[in-house]
Image (tube, rainbow, N blue to C red):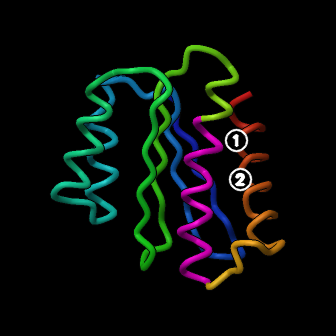
Amino acid sequence: MREQEIYLEQYDWTIRVCYNVKDKDCSIIRKSLLKLGCKGEPLDDACNLIMENKPNKGITYSNIDKHQTVVSVGFTIEESEFVNSISHEMLHAVQHIAEKFSLDPKGEDVCYLMGSLMQAVYLFYI
């Protein structure tokens, strides 16, 4: 598993991204989710998904009040699946930030936000 922290100064928001997550990494992701206040069924569902150890899976959890998000992307079979999985999960993060700051989901701000997140992923992961 590889880990990246992305800080969005404009929103004072931190996104912790975990790549190539496998079942053996579940305890690390669980601790991160607990730290954000994730508990009960959402926590169980996230851990169960990771423990299935199936390719092309991901989860995103945000604590909107803390301005923090955890993104977990499992192992992928091919590069195109990685692009699909990471963009899918990052869109959830963008939606959470847009909700907190009342950003227009059809506006330029969310497009620039998504672009900056994907650029950060590219620079780190590729």
At 43% from the left and 28% from the top, the residue drawn is 21
Query: In the rendered structure, which segment of residues is drawn in magenta?
Result: 85-101
Vertical arrangement, residue 22 with respect to residue 66, above or below: above
Q: Position of residue 67 (x, y in %)?
A: 50, 72
- Quarter-of-image position of residue 13: bottom right
Vertical arrangement, residue 37 with respect to residue 85, above or below: below
As drawn, is 11 to the left or to the right of 61? right
Q: Main secondary structure of the magenta part?
A: helix
Vertical arrangement, residue 10 with respect to residue 102, above or below: above
Vertical arrangement, residue 14 with respect to residue 82, above or below: below
Circle 1: residue type: Val
| Residue sitting nearer the eye, 81 or 123 | 81
To which residue does mark 2 refer? 117
Q: Position of residue 103 (x, y in %)?
A: 68, 80
To which residue does mark 1 refer? 121
Circle 2: residue type: Leu
